[in-house]
Structure formats: C-alpha cells, structure tokens
Image (cartoon, helix red, strand yellow):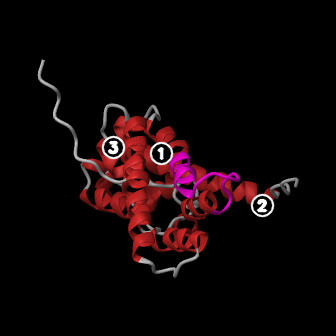
Amino acid sequence: MPVPPVSRRERKKAATRQAIGDAALQLFLERGYDQVGIRDIADAADVSTATVFKHFSGKEALVFDQDEDRESELIAAVRQRAPGQSFLDALQQHVLDTWLSIAAHPQRAEFVSLVESTPVLRAYAERMWTRHTDSLSAAIADEIGVDPDNLACVALARFVLDIPTLARGRQDPRAAVEEIFGILAHGWKPPREPSAP
C-alpha cells in the first residue's frame, strides 16, 4: 500500500519542530541546561515562545525531542511484527534499531554529560521510556490473550523499557541489550565463576 504524501503544512511543522529542538540542544550544550530559558530557545530558532510550547510540552522535552512517536513505535513493534516472529524478538530488534543509533551519535558523549550533570534531566530520562509501561503491557497482553493489567505482562513491559538505562555505559551496548533480552526470554541463571587454571 503506498504511503500518502506528506502535506506541505506537515513538512513545515516538522521542520519548525526540528529547528527548535536543534537550537535548544545547541544552547544547552554551550551554556548548560539551567542557564537557558525558553525565550533564548525561541530567539535562536526564530519563533515565538508560544510556538515552542505548541511543539514541546516543556523544557525537558526539548532535550529529548525525538520522543514524540516512541509509544506508537513500541506498540507497532509488537502488533506489526513479521509472521512467526515472537514479540520479544520484535521488541529486541526495535530497541537495537532505535537506541543503538542514538548511542552511536557523534554528540552522544556531550549529550550524556549534559543529562548526567542535570538532576531534572536524569530523572526525566529515567521516566521517558518507562512511562509507556501500561500501553506496551496492554499490547503484549492483547497478543497473548490475557487481561490488560496482567502482572507478568506489566513486569515484562517494564523490564523491556528499562533496557536502554541498564545497557547505558556498557562497553558493548549491543551485547548488553541481547543479554538482557536473553534473560527475559529464557530466565535468569546465576553467573558462573571462571574456572581455575
């Protein structure tokens, strides 16, 4: 089925959002999060403060400007997975496709330093993915035919959503993501002590 063309209005809206997000991140990296106000961001993006708030719910959201479609993408990973693919495999691929590209971004070190040095951003980052727990657990529950508030589905969704935080800072992020999904799929086993030579 062909994808309908994006209207000029939608392209302009997306370009404005991108310009605001880019201006905000640049200012935050240059001056620090607490030293930048919404007026500074609006001026740098050449828009009004009302336009900033039309596109972003608050100052924290400006740092994480790619978060808008995360929930629908998570649900699509479960519901629109390939025939025969388990929803855990589909979610693993989704996390690898989305999070690893962010982890490899050239400004990643500066961005992480900004987030880690700003308590309000650290807290927001922790909540950012996990706030989708209810929607993701309902999609999983629907796929296996149980009640939407099934505790096993809620726990599984929460663990999946915590994976980027758990894998952050690991030497091999891909291996960390795969190991955690392996635990979710096959259960936890105690690590073995290395054999003595």
Work out how far the residue at label 2 is from the one at label 3, CA to CA, in angstroms: 37 Å
Residue 163 visible in the shown view: yes
According to the image, label 2 marks what residue?
A: 9
| Label 1: element kind | helix
Crowd rating for badge 3 (residues with CA inside 10 Å; few <14, some 14–19, many 20+): some
Crowd rating for badge 2 (residues with CA inside 10 Å; few <14, some 14–19, many 20+): few
According to the image, label 3 marks what residue?
A: 168
Q: Is residue 91 magenta?
A: yes
Q: Nearer the viewer, mark 2 or mark 3?
A: 3
- Tell me the number on the disc at residue 99: 1
| Label 3: element kind | loop
Residue sitting at x 44%, y 67%: 58
Residue 122 placed where, x, y %? 29, 56
Q: Earlier in the sequence, mark 2 or mark 3?
A: 2
Work out how far the residue at label 3 is from the one at label 1, CA to CA, in angstroms: 10 Å
Nearer to us in this view, 191 or 69: 191
Q: Tell me which segment is drawn in magenta.
A: 79-94
Residue sitting at x 53%, y 53%: 91
Q: Is residue 176 above or below residue 36?
A: above
**Residue 133 appears in which quarter of the rendering?**
bottom left
Nearer to us in this view, 176 or 150: 150
Task: Find the residue positioned furthest to the left.
Answer: 196
